[in-house]
Amino acid sequence: MVKKKINIAASILSADFSILGKEVKDIDKAGSDMIHIDVMDGSFVPNITIGPSVISNIRPFSKKPFDVHLMINEPSKHVDEFIAAGADILTIHYEADLHPIRTLDYIKSKGIKAGIAINPATPEVALESLLDYCDLILVMLVNPGFGGQKTILSQIKKVKSISAMLKKHKKNIYLEVDGGVNPLNIKNLVKAGANLIVAGNAIFKDGKDFYEKNIRALKVPRVK
């Protein structure tokens, strides 16, 4: 039977920010399929991370797609800045935008991919009316705001339900998961239907010399 491909988006939230450009270059070379960039505003989530200027500065270090996850309130006000900075995929939160269809449609009109993310407490039914407007769905397996958290197991069932929803509507889009992913639980996530896996600590935890090995360990659990 055909094996499902596991795409890995390395989350630079776990990288060494003092050498961020080099870290991006190293995870690119180590086999990451995408570079996942978490943008936090200290309002929608309790933490604050980076903005468009940092993304612009690290853009030259990799030709891999920049998967930019906006964990910010009123993301529509900042879409153009992040597109100009080099985002290839721009994901907004359902909970943070009063008019997600309009924002998703606008992102796509700019020639990049549009994603919609949902928090653990948000039911998957909220996504059904958005499927025609997004290229990616991001299921948060933890409450967003900090790296290093453990996966909330109930979210795996949500991933399975969304996968069934996509099949029902014949939508061929990324089903991304983020939060506590490691070589021990990735197989269950892929079986549930996830095809784009965000991983931070699982990749960066042992230092540069282990990035390739850690990414390979995440890609090993093929699903028949």
Image (cartoon, helix red, strand yellow):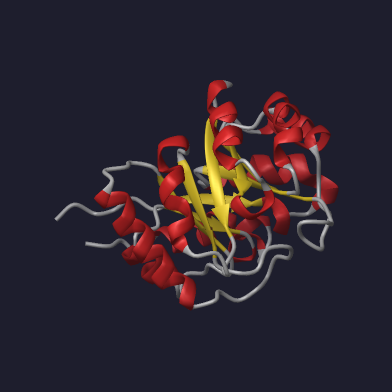
Residue occupying the point 49% across, 65% down: 123
Nearer to me, 198 or 84: 84
Q: Note whether residue 113 is visible.
A: yes
Q: Position of residue 182 (x, y in %)?
A: 52, 69
| Rendering quarter of residue 149 | bottom right
52 is higher (above) or lower (below) than 124:
above
| Residue positioned most to the left | 1
173 horizontally vs 26: left or right: left
167 is higher (above) or lower (below) than 146:
above
Residue occupying the point 24% across, 54% down: 3
Quarter of the image where the C terminus is located:
bottom left
Quarter of the image where the N terminus is located:
bottom left
Q: Position of residue 137 (x, y in %)?
A: 48, 49
Q: Note whether residue 221 is visible.
A: no
Q: Position of residue 114 (x, y in %)?
A: 54, 36
Residue occupying the point 55% across, 64% down: 122
Nearer to me, 92 or 183: 92
Residue occupying the point 47% across, 39% down: 134
| Residue positioned most to the top | 110
Nearer to me, 13 or 44: 44
Q: Position of residue 126 (x, y in %)?
A: 48, 56
| Rendering quarter of residue 74 | top right
222 horizontally vs 100: left or right: left
